[in-house]
Image: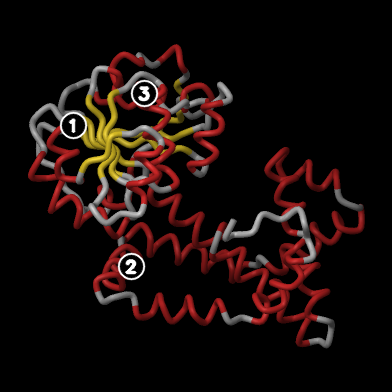
Amino acid sequence: MATVYYDDDADLGLVQSRKVAVLGYGSQGHAHALCLRDSGCEVRVGLAEGSRSRAKAEAAGLKVLAPAEACAWADLIMVLVPDTVQRHLYASDIEPNLRPGDALFFAHGFNIHFGYVTPPEGIDVAMVAPKGPGHLVRRQFEEGQGTPCLVAVAQDASGKAWDLAKSYARGIGGTRAGALVTTFQEETETDLFGEQAVLCGGVTALIQASFETLAKAGYQPEVAYFECLHELKMIVDLIYEGGPKWMRYSVSDTAEYGDYTRGPRVIDDAVRAEMERILVEIRSGDFAREWVAEDDAGRPNFNRLRAEAREHQIEQVGEPLRAMMSWLRRPED
């Protein structure tokens, strides 16, 4: 069984005694900064002068500084900018302002695990990674509850890095629900694998392939959209609430029988073998090197793939269908 920490295991006073710089004010950044402030912590948000998020952070009552200034002021720095930005920000603004006794925190282990950021000795390096988007972290905190999180320590220079990580997790509400102990390696590799094999890559590829199969066979694309994409939310919600057995209890016996007998034909030995190859690429660092090189080159392949995906028939069919659904929250809202 995993080790899980709760409020009684965490001393909130530890993070309250630190000067915390939160670098970034996106989904996670705004949640961390606001929750820490409301937990009695002294917080500064580090944002570039031209950042569109500066006005939002200031309107929320937070003090905003340039990243280098925030790092120089702080003795605990939480890095919440995109993976591909972190190594550049570290070299320009974080590393020059690190002092012995400081703590460097992350919400994802990518740059530490794959060696794109290498903090000096004398610095605590830890991770507090909520298992939910920032708006959920913030909403749960405001409602007196919490979002489960993962905690890890990569470098315990002070001998108290674990205590500080638990304290930080409590400051954002994580230990109300539970902070599960992991490692930078485990979090990074499982996170990348989950995104690629299931949550993003696997799911979207499965949806598009099934949609294309029905459309190619002559069925109306609109009906194919409903059957292969629209109804997925209902199934995922049921699995989310109670696992596969709750979903199978809730659907028809016909659907359940099709699940047992046809699902393994779709996810067959060839698919499992490909999943294993994907995991090998992640664990070896090949995927990280590929992605960093793609970013350094200006993302030509990424931009091409993004443009092609946006022009897929399923996007053209789905837009007018979603307009029929008054209950949907539009992406631009």
Residue placed at 73% from the left, 38% from the top?
242
Q: Is the C terminus in the top left, top right, bottom left or bottom right quadrant?
A: bottom right
What percent of the width, then of the height, locates residue 264? 72, 63
Kindly identify which residue carries mark 3.
166
Closer mark to the observer between disc 2 and disc 1: 1
Q: Which residue is mark 2?
A: 291
Q: Give the tally of numbered discs.
A: 3
Q: Which residue is located at x 48 percent, y 42 percent?
A: 134
The answer to whether residue 148 is left or right of residue 125 is right
State which tag comes first along the sequence, 2 or 1: 1
Q: Nearer the viewer, residue 99 or 185?
A: 99
Callout in the foreground (1, 3):
1
Residue 40 higher or lower than 231, as above or below: above
Give the SS element for disc 3. helix
> Residue 217 location in percent, x, y?
81, 86
Residue 105 makes an appearance in the image: no
Check whether the beta carbons of the residues at disc 2 and disc 1 lie within 8 A of each other: no
Percent across and percent down for residue 332 are 57, 60
Depth check, front residue: 151 or 333: 333
Characterize the local packing of mark 3: few (<14), some (14-19) or many (20 or more) Cα atoms within 10 angstroms.
many
Give the spatial CA distance, label 1 vs label 3. 19 Å
Q: Is residue 88 left or right of residue 197?
A: left
Instruction: Residue 201: name its quadrant.
Output: bottom right
Report the Cα–Cα distance between label 2 and label 3. 31 Å
Indicate whether 172 appears above or below 71: above
Near mark 1 (Cα within 10 A), the count class, few <14, some 14-19 or many ≥20, is many
Percent of width and height locating residue 192: 43, 56
Amino acid carrying label 2: it is: Trp
Tell me the element at label 1: loop
- Residue type at mark 3: give it: Lys
Closer to the chain start, of discs 1 and 3, is 1
Are discs 2 and 3 less than 8 Å apart at CB? no
